[in-house]
Amino acid sequence: MNAPDIALGVVRGPAHGVRRRLTARWVVHVAVAVAVIGTINTIRNPGPFLSAWLVVSSFAVLIGVGEYFRFPVEDGRQLAPMTLATGLAFALTSVSWQVDLTHLAPGPIVMVSAIAMLCGALPHAARGRSLRVEEMAARFLAIFVTALLFRWAPLWSGRTLLEVDATWVGSRWPVAVLLAVIAAIGLFTFLGLSALVMASRSAGSLRQAFLDEVRSGAGLGLALSATGALIALAERPLGVLALPLFLVPLVLTQFALRQYAAIRATYAQTVRVLSRLTEMGGFTRAGHPDRVAELCVAVGRDLGLSGRDIRNLENAALLHDIGQVALRAPIPAGATLMAAPADQRRIASDSADIVRKTGLPPEVAIAVEHQATPYRVVREHRQQVPMLSRIVKVANAYDDLVGGSIALRRREAAVERIHLGLGYEYDPRVVDSLVRVLARRHTKGP
């Protein structure tokens, strides 16, 4: 792809982000359709729902409370583990002490879960916060799939698993395994839909997004599915008392996760403040670290890097020029691209030394240290240069040439200049990814 391709907005390679955004919207559309159908079916046959109103109300309250106390994590998502665990338990409960829920179809469970989640989310909307409807839809559809598989689908010799469960009265292990498997399927439904939502937001790889979801949510996901199955089992002798009894450990875990997320957010803000030292000292153009970081993240996602690598890449990009504060005289416009190779290596080394003292992962300092290494050492001498370093090198060169300009001619000239060093200074894969990212940006508008 050449510079005119960028002007025309031509995109080759990974699927265009617009298609994924449309796919993510379909998650919401499907959730709305399921909620409407479930509500209609419940209104037509309200008998089983009304006969178990106390148990149903208990689940509804806790689902709503869990949705209200959702919390943000560092990748921009919001988690509501209490909502999902309670919803899975609701879908899997067949008996609650003396209350029989075997006649409760998926419809009432769907309707109650939807209403409870909306009630829990509305206070956030009233305060001007985002409802995060895609993430809510992912949780809701996970509950729906669990209820559908357990209560409606004839998966066992023409019978539903709920009917099979009723014939295993007194057989604890088979019932426990059955409930755990169905809860795990519901959990993986949630992880898959969450990955779809995240991939649509970032225009990244769906496969990588799913792997990130599994890696980051493995521990919490296991706790959620286990809690849902345990509540469904414990409700048989304990009734609704099983809900607070088994949700208390999850609430404590959620509190710890909220604290951890707050600490990580504060740490990220500290890194951003540190990255602005070069701007405040007049060593780099205003906004240079932020622009390079934004471009690096986009390229990293286009190349399918993991969530952990993306975070390390962003931090490396923010602090890649921090070593310039040790210079006696600033480089013109802070453009290290124009500096001599020896000066580039010295700045990279000084930057890496500072990064090592910040407590960031070692991969960040390594990426910063090798940012001045030309790609030819990989091709000719088989030296190992981290992919993060190659991305920072290309993104930094592009911003050094373009700055904050939105002029198309200047952007085309920058890409042409980078192409002159293709295979010698810059990794061709990274440059191709940069071109795709710029093309997508151009189709969206400046």
Image (cartoon, rainbow, N blue to C red):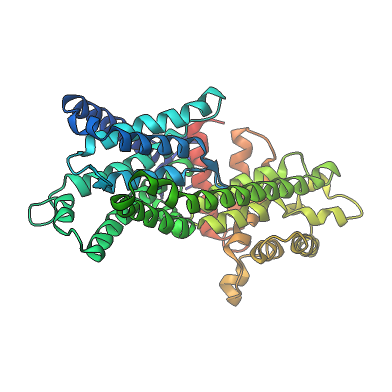
Q: Quadrant of residue 135?
A: top left
For the C terminus, the image quarter is top right
Is residue 29 left or right of 276 when viewed as pictured? left
Is residue 102 left or right of 431 when viewed as pictured? left
Residue at the far right in the pictured view: 328
Residue at the far top in the pictured view: 126
Q: Is residue 211 visible to us here?
A: no
Q: On screen, 336 above or below 41?
A: below
Residue placed at 60% from the left, 77% from the top? 381
Is residue 153 left or right of 376 when viewed as pictured? left
Q: Position of residue 340 (x, y in %)?
A: 79, 60
Residue placed at 61% from the left, 65% from the top? 375
Q: Position of residue 118 (x, y in %)?
A: 41, 29
- Residue situated in front as seen by the camera: 70 or 308: 70
Residue at the far bottom in the pictured view: 381
- Residue situated in front as seen by the camera: 90 or 203: 90
Residue placed at 33% from the left, 54% from the top? 234
Q: Position of residue 402 (x, y in %)?
A: 67, 41
Is residue 214 left or right of 262 when viewed as pictured? left
Q: Position of residue 310 (x, y in %)?
A: 56, 54
- Residue situated in front as seen by the camera: 444 or 105: 105
Q: Is residue 84 visible to us here?
A: yes
